[in-house]
Image: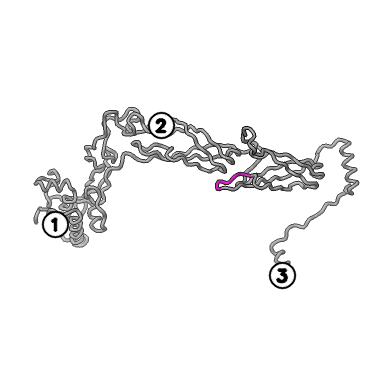
Amino acid sequence: MSQDPYELLGVARDADADAIKKAYRRLARQLHPDVNPDPETQERFKEVSRAYEILSDPQKRAAFDRGGDPFGGGAGGFGQGAGFSFTDIMDAFFGGQAGPGGAAGGRGPRPRTRRGQDALIRLEVELAEAAFGVTRELTVDTAVLCSTCHGEGAAPGTHAVPCETCRGQGEVAHVQRSFLGEIRTLRPCAACRGLGTVIPEPCRECSGDGRVRSRRSLTVKIPAGVDTGTRVQLSEQGEVGPGGGPAGDLYVEIHVAAHDVFTRQGNDLHCTVTVPMSAAALGTTLTLPTLEADVEQGGDSGVETTFPLDVRPGTQSGTQQVLRARGVPGLRGGRGDLIVTIAVETPTKLDPRQEELLRELAAIRGEEEPTGQLKPGSKSVFGRLRDAFNQH
């Protein structure tokens, strides 16, 4: 059998990579031991695989064309312990694409420069700041570009060099014997961690990482209408990547502090105002603060910081009044309402004169011995259905 890889694959000496790949696929399908298990066919399959291993690698092909040994004498001739790549077999049967250098499925070195991770910080704001927006100065501790090596990781005046173990490929071959012969798989190079290059003299400032940790200040603008859990994104303000790669994003997560007066439900504000029993019976007008009162206003800004609340005569405890568009502005426009709940306060301690006057009022109203009024409760579902049928 010829030892010429071109003759073994049946291709011309000027054949391109695609022609060589197609020829190998065709022969691999015919000669694979699963299809033809006889020893002679197995031996030819090894030789064809060996020929493809040479012609698919530009360096080995060039060495053969010059009359040299493409394997440096370490693997012998075609018929002696022929080796082949497992990815080449898979490519022959499943049509994989050639990687760098013509080898099927080749990954090559992984990049030294990569994008940095996103960062998250939490910021507590007051209710008024969340409602109307605020600008804050933040101090963050993240990885930044090393100012000594500018991200290269090498000491000034030096540079990264190709790894001698993998010759810059970032991968090394691992050979394992099987019934097919020697199966070669690729693994990341341990010497360079799959990068393909090593740094002989790492930068002393960043120890070769291309980045250092630093505390810095930045300004964040919190939009009006945010709520607890809202995240504000600051693009490229996160961690700088290894090797001086682009920075990730910084997310500021909002936490709204509890307010002394108002509670928030969505974009609506709720508050409770307590009035004396006499004021609820006779009616009155109260002046209450708005949420804008918490925001410092310089000069005559025209912003209302108070609003009048009319308590009508005979107001009962639990009555609610809705003031439109006095709540929290929405992130997409509009504004919620302010719902005021009135609680009527019944006096618990009366002096003799007050007790006398109340008894006199009760006598005038005929309430010395009230019987109470029982109101029917809500009907059940079956009761409502029965009433509906009785109406027909």
Specify the quadrant that holds the C terminus: bottom right
Please name the residue that numbered disc 1 is placed on. 11
Viewer-nearest residue: 363 or 297 = 297
Q: Could you tell which of marks 3 and 2 lies nearer the N-terminus?
A: 2
In the picture, residue 240 is in which quadrant? Answer: top left
Mark 3: give few (<14), some (14-19) or many (20+) Cα within 10 Å.
Answer: few
Judged by depth in the image, the label closer to the viewer, 3 or 1, is 1
Numbered circles on residues, count = 3
Which residues are the magenta region? 327-332
Q: Position of residue 106 (x, y in %)?
A: 25, 48
Is 263 in the magenta? no
**Structural distance between the alpha carbons of marks 3 and 2:** 77 Å
Viewer-nearest residue: 164 or 156 = 156
Is 331 in the magenta? yes
> Among all residues in the image, which is located at the extreme bottom?
392
The secondary element bearing badge 2 is classed as strand
Mark 2: give few (<14), some (14-19) or many (20+) Cα within 10 Å.
Answer: some
Please name the residue that numbered disc 3 is placed on. 389
What's the residue type where badge 1 is placed? Answer: Val
Q: Position of residue 198 (x, y in %)?
A: 26, 35
Q: Could you tell which of marks 3 and 1 lies nearer the N-terminus?
A: 1
The secondary element bearing badge 1 is classed as loop
Q: Which mark is residue 213?
A: 2
Q: Is residue 27 above or below residue 200?
A: below
